[in-house]
Amino acid sequence: MKNCLFLLYALLIMVVSYGQEQIASPVPDLSPPVYPTETLPESEINIPVQIDLTPFFALANKKVDTLFTSPDFPNAWVQDGCAIRYKYSFRRGPLQFSLKNTTLDISFTGYYKIIGSTRGCVNGKAITPWTPACQCGFEEGERKVKVGFTIDIALLTNYTIKMQVTRREPEPLDRCNVCFWGQDITSSILDALKKELDQSKAAMEKAYGRIDLKPRFQDLWNRLNSPYNVSNMGWLQVNPQKIRVNSISTANNLLQLSVGLAAKPVVRFEKPAAVVTPVPHISNFSREKGFQVYVDMVMNYDSLSRILTSQIKGKEFVFSKAFIKKRFVFQECRLLGNQDNRLVMQVKFTGTDNGFFYVTGKPLYYADTRALQVTDVDFDLKSKDALLKTADWLFSKKITHEIEKMAKYDLTETLNTVKDNIRQQLNQEFIKGVSGTGSVNDISVAGIFPQTNWLAVRAYCNGNLILNISGMDLSL
């Protein structure tokens, strides 16, 4: 009896073992890896740049002479025609700066004193000796004159700042009447002062008439082309395409530029190579407020597979095939890659049989729920052919519907993380003296692109950014 029971048990094991068929569908054909950079729309980044001109003003105060005198003062005389001779000392007060649009006014009050004498002349020949020297601006206080320059600022398309300096006519606030004969020699003093100011004007135009900013823009362009590690996101590469300057204006001590940038920013898991291209000339293109940026994020298939498997593992279905019960139990769903813009998934199962087959599905994003879902799930063609020969009972909408129901990913946390990271990157000091103040208004998904090893999720982001430049290096 025991031998019969043992034989029956062994026979049962053999039957069960023989009946549990191993099913292995062939791997589907995957599309070659093509990163969708070519399809990335140009993002527009409009940045108001505020440049603090205080260092420039301080440098101008330092560079412009504070004391002008007649040659070899106080020993030598300057002779104005036959009848007048004088020698003078002129000092300037602090420079005052006034900005309006693209015009910079520099003005200051000058303080002068003079020693002079006169003599009688006929037809340019002296007929009397020089009178005793008399003074103006000593005992009664220095005489005052208002002096100024006007500088027109323009930015050329080759990144050259052109400054055209115009000397304004000196405006005497006090007249200078020399000694007892009461002769007004203010005009003679002003003529001498104009020569000194014209020399200062020439020096200013030589130093600041043309400032080549192209090396700095090229450095900025290179930085934008270099990959930049963004915490929790990967490597950001801005990929600039064009640059423009909408307008130049001034307010208080600030030079304000409205800079626009067309770019194709991309975020990748793996560090891309830096790109070296020459910075293009300033051009014109559309002018929107703030910035509008498309950023490609990447979602690793391994992490997506773990999420899907955790949601679907253990799900069981029972099917009837020719009055025979067939059990199907999900074990794993693994995302593999892309086939004609559809995700390819390997489904491992146990139950009556065990093995794996492949399905494909189309990834879609639902903005109202911020969910990424794999829809239109169906068996891969190669799997269909294999299953028709071995296990046609697996062709069930229940299986594909269950995968479709579970292959759903909430992107709310991911998008919020990206938004927070972008906000942090905007509000920082980028390089010494250049800091940003920005905000992110909205972020949404604009496209989904299945790749070989990861899923590219194209995000659209808009917001505002102001660049503040202070303490700039003026050693040009």
Image (cartoon, rainbow, N blue to C red):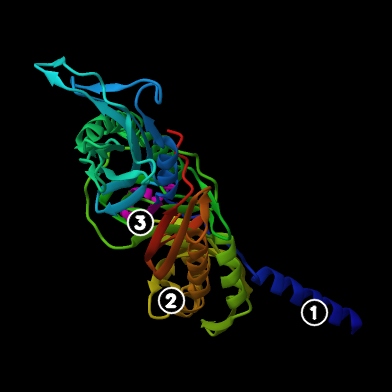
Q: Give the percent coordinates (x, y) of residue 184.
A: 20, 38
Q: Please check the rendered image and state whether residue 41 is part of the magenta-colored stretch, yes or no.
A: yes
Q: Residue lying farthest top?
A: 125
State which tag comes first along the sequence, 2 or 3.
3
Q: Give the percent coordinates (x, y) of residue 130.
A: 26, 21
- State the CA–CA distance, disc 1 to disc 2: 58 Å
Could you classify mark 3 by the number of other residues whose Cα lies within 10 Å: few (under 14), some (14-19), or many (20 or more)? many
The magenta segment is 32-51
Q: Residue at x 10, y 18 (%)?
A: 122
Q: Is residue 339 left or right of residue 326?
A: left
Label of residue 47 in the image? 3
Q: Please check the rendered image and state whether residue 335 is part of the magenta-colored stretch, yes or no.
A: no
Residue that badge 2 annotates: 370
Q: Amino acid at mark 1?
A: Leu
Q: Amino acid at mark 2?
A: Arg
The C terminus lies in quadrant: top left
Q: Give the percent coordinates (x, y) of residue 54.
A: 43, 50
Q: Nearer the viewer, residue 311 or 279?
A: 279
Q: Nearer the viewer, residue 183 or 291?
A: 183
Q: Amino acid at mark 3?
A: Ile
Could you classify mark 1 by the number of other residues whose Cα lies within 10 Å: few (under 14), some (14-19), or many (20 or more)? few
Q: Nearer the viewer, residue 22 or 399?
A: 399
